[in-house]
Structures are given as C-alpha cells and as structure tokens.
Image (cartoon, rainbow, N blue to C red):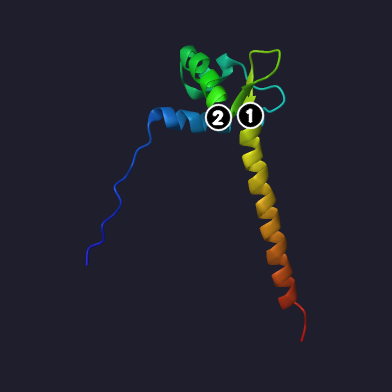
Amino acid sequence: MATDKPKAVTLPTHTLKTCELFRLLAGHELLGLAPGEIAKALGVGAPWVSNYLPALAAETGFVERVEGTNRWRLGVPFVRISVTVSTELASAKRRLDEVSNRYHVPL
C-alpha cells in the first residue's frame, strides 16, 4: 500500500523575507531599526524596505514606524498575538500543574 506524500511547497521569497523581518524586529520594540539596518540584515535593497514596510503597516499593522523617526518596529497587533500565545501557554501550564499535583498526593 503506497502512501502519497504531500507535494513539497516552496514559499515565495517575499513571504520568507516577511517572516525574517518579523524575527529581525523582535526585541527592538522601543527604538526600532533603521531602514538601512533592515535592508542589510535581510539582504534586500532599500526600495524593498521603503515600499514594503509602509504597505505592510497600512494593511496589517504588524509593523509600525517609531513616532518621530524613520525607524521601524513590530506593530501592536503583532505583539498582541505573542501576548495571547504567552497567556494561553501559562494557562495551560497552570491546568497541567493542577492535574499533576492531584496525582502527587499520597493515598
């Protein structure tokens, strides 16, 4: 009985660069990064940064310009996703600890 393997899908470069952008901006929420720093780290040209980041900000809010500067950081909607994940993981851990503690009580 042969099993059909799913066909490998290669993501478009644009999608991969966007994921790399999110990783790059993580940890720079206060000051953000300058467009030149972003372009160099991602290996893209300045036009990609100057065209793509404002469009991404306008359509998703996942990135935002640091007020009063030309620097970029993760946007509030993106950070809220990570806060939600963290909250849910903490809740799951508490529930697991409660179950575990019930089993550790001697008979």
Disc 2: CA contacts within 10 A as few (<14), some (14-19) or many (>=20): few
Report the side of 101 relative to 65 (left or right).
right
Where the N terminus falls, by quadrant? bottom left
Amino acid type of the residue that numbered disc 2 sits on in the rendered structure: Thr
Which secondary structure lies at badge 1? loop
Amino acid type of the residue that numbered disc 1 sits on in the rendered structure: Gly
Name the residue beneath numbered marker 2: 60
In the rendering, at what x and y percent does residue 30 appear?
A: 72, 25
In the rendering, at what x and y percent does residue 81 appear?
A: 62, 41
Extreme bottom residue here?
Answer: 107
Query: Residue at (56%, 23%) from the top-left corner?
Result: 58
In the rendering, at what x and y percent does residue 93 appear?
A: 69, 60
Please determine whether, in this image, residue 76 is positioned above or below residue 50: below
Label 1–label 2 contact, CB within 8 A: yes
**Label 1, label 2: how far apart the Cα atoms are:** 9 Å
Question: Which of the 4 image quarters holds residue 38?
Answer: top right
Question: Which of the 4 image quarters holds residue 104?
Answer: bottom right
Extreme right residue here?
Answer: 106
Q: Nearer the viewer, residue 60 or 69?
A: 60
Please determine whether, in this image, residue 11 is positioned above or below residue 66: below
Query: Residue at (58%, 18%) from the top-left corner?
Result: 37
Where the C terminus falls, by quadrant? bottom right
In the rendering, at what x and y percent does residue 69 appear?
A: 68, 13
Please determine whether, in this image, residue 35 is positioned above or below residue 42: above
The mark that comes first in sequence, 1 or 2, is 2
Q: Nearer the viewer, mark 1 or mark 2?
A: 2
Q: How many marks?
A: 2
Which secondary structure lies at badge 2? helix
Query: Residue at (61%, 28%) from the top-left corner?
Result: 25
